[in-house]
Amino acid sequence: MKSSRREFLGAAAGLALAGSTKPEKIHAANAGTNQIVNIYDNIVYEAGDAIPDWGFSAYITYNGKTILFDAGTYPEIFKHNTTVFGVDLVAVDTVILSHNHMDHKGGLDYFLDAYEDYTLYLPNEWNIGGPFPTIFKKDGTYARGYSYRHRNTQYVIEHTEISNGIHIIATESPIIGTSWGYPPHEEKPLFMGLPELSLALENGTGQVILIS
């Protein structure tokens, strides 16, 4: 896989990208093509007018779908960088949150407030509105996180193909993630795991790009 500051060329998955990596040319050169544009990260090299910051967000067009995968840390930086790279947030029909950490979900505060017409895929995480873990309650009561729920919200608990060649893969770590008490302060800390979503793009011949 060949990569640059703001574009990732996935030849194996059949992603067709134009040649320039200049930020101001991304939207013009690649309009209507399959592409992945990295709009939020902390890499300074080739940042242009974008603001580097700790976090992650990718704007993806593939097989007729326009996907926002994560939204970085700060709403104002997320908004600024989308303007710099000329990505069309109005065209987004699919939003995927990888996991419940602020450097991936913070920018959603801007996006969810400004736009409505999309499907929001969330990990099955109790802190963002999913059901409480059975270790706490057994009645399926929904918890916090209502700011990330709208009319097209789906909590993903298993592998889901959302469109032709576009897959959401659900995983959960039994240890890494949210911990209820930490050693050595707790002799038996309760590790609750952390649900996470990855995105797989395939080209029909078994070749895949994985974003995780």
Image: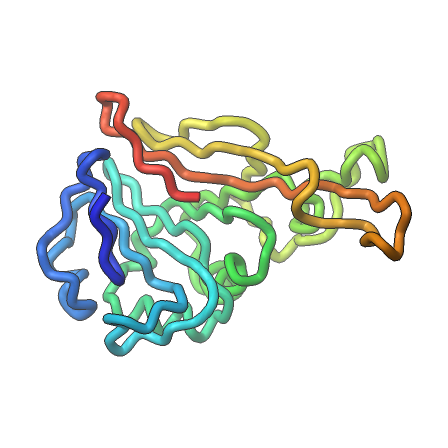
Where's residue 10, x and y in %? 22, 42
Where's residue 79, x and y in %? 39, 70
209 versus 71 height, above or below:
above
For the residue pair 127 and 42, the one nearer the viewer reads as: 42
In the displayed structure, does residue 153 sit left or right of residue 201?
A: right
Where's residue 164, x and y in %? 30, 27
Q: State the residue lying farthest toward the bottom.
A: 49
In the displayed structure, does residue 42 sit left or right of residue 179?
A: left
The residue positioned 39% from the left and 64% from the top of the image is 41
The residue positioned 46% from the left and 39% from the top of the image is 198
Coloration of the structure image:
rainbow
In the displayed structure, does residue 95 sit left or right of residue 25?
A: right
In the displayed structure, does residue 187 sit left or right of residue 180?
A: right
The residue positioned 56% from the left and 41% from the top of the image is 196
Q: Quadrant of the C terminus?
A: top left
Q: Quadrant of the N terminus?
A: top left
For the residue pair 156 and 119, the one nearer the viewer reads as: 156
Residue 53, by quadrant, is: bottom left
Q: State the residue lying farthest toward the front.
A: 184
The residue positioned 32% from the left and 66% from the top of the image is 82
How many numbered discs, if any?
0
Where's residue 147, x and y in %? 62, 57
